[in-house]
Image (cartoon, rainbow, N blue to C red):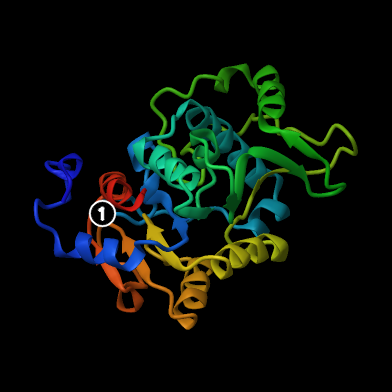
Amino acid sequence: MTESERGVPGIPESSDALDAAVDALAGKRVVVLTGAGVSTDSGIPDYRGEGAPKRNPMTFDQFLANADFRKRYWAGSHLGWKLFDAARPNIGHAVLATMEQAGVVTGIVTQNVDGLHVRAGSNRVVDLHGSMDRVRCLNCGQMFARDSIGATIDAANPWITKPDAVTVNPDGDAEVTNWADFVVPVCTVCGGILKPDVVFFGEFIPKERFGEASDLVRASEALIIAGSSLVVNSGIRLLEQARRRRLPIVIINRGDTKGDSRATVKLDAGTTETLTALAARLIP
């Protein structure tokens, strides 16, 4: 173990699991699948990690069917976006960007919608579940920058512009109660329903986007899964693609995941410190 790894929280001084992960990954082109656990050190909460509150996110059908559901969602999403926009990439994000620049990581497939991998400097990122910084019209398909929609919302709802003391969720939806008078933005092109360009519960991941993720797995020689409990089916599908090709699979997550039995190595530790320790030994 190098000097830079000693004393890193969550990484024991002598870690057989860390050594095994390095042996499995050394000299290979690695694709990384990330989940909410990668962003917790940026202040964004985890869905299913220890201590995470139970919640029932709004479904796509609810959003489409009822104007009141859209009011509640947009009120919470607007506050959540303000907090997401203020979040900054953490050391784990930066380490993955450095590993890509060094040729160790081929790309990142993320289940997160916070955009922090791109802001950290990663170049090849597949936003599997979309990104909160884009808004799409469900009628005409026009895309908008989230900042411009946010300015429209602030002008129409000045009472909701301060996100103090709100609870935000990993999908960017904050808990709100005073949404009855919220003015929902509409498409300035056709007047249609606007929705952040993220995959809701009950929606399918666009086929082209999942194809991009699959292409990254096919072009790689190993898979790291970091900060995901693998409850969402898309992550399991990518893990299975790697397993069928007999690629080494390293899972980094606090607590159990649905893929642990299929992993070459499982590290029960935080993602930031573990990715830092791996990078110190994998970057030439």
Judge whether 13 appears above or below 178 on screen.
Answer: below
Residue shown at 37% from the left, 43% from the top: 45
Q: Residue furthest right?
A: 190
- The reply to whether residue 66 is visible in this rendering is yes
The answer to whether residue 31 is left or right of residue 211 is: left
Judge whether 263 appears above or below 269 on screen.
Answer: below
Q: Position of residue 163 (x, y in %)?
A: 47, 24
The answer to whether residue 177 is left or right of residue 224 is: right
Q: Position of residue 194 (x, y in %)?
A: 75, 41
Amino acid tagged 1: Glu
Residue shown at 31% from the left, 59% from the top: 252
Judge whether 181 appears above or below 239 on screen.
Answer: above
Q: Residue furthest front?
A: 284
Tally of numbered discs: 1
Q: Nearer the viewer, residue 181 or 106?
A: 106
The answer to whether residue 151 is left or right of residue 39 is: right
Crowding near the residue tagged with mark 1, few <14, some 14–19, many ≥20 C-alpha atoms within 10 Å: few
Q: Which residue is mark 1?
A: 50
Residue shown at 9% from the left, 51% from the top: 13
Q: Nearer the viewer, residue 256 or 137?
A: 256
Label 1 SS: loop
Q: Position of residue 161 (x, y in %)?
A: 56, 20
Q: Residue furthest left?
A: 13
- The reply to whether residue 177 is visible in this rendering is no
Judge whether 239 appears above or below 79 on screen.
Answer: below
Q: Position of residue 273 (x, y in %)?
A: 26, 45
Residue shown at 58% from the left, 43% from the top: 123
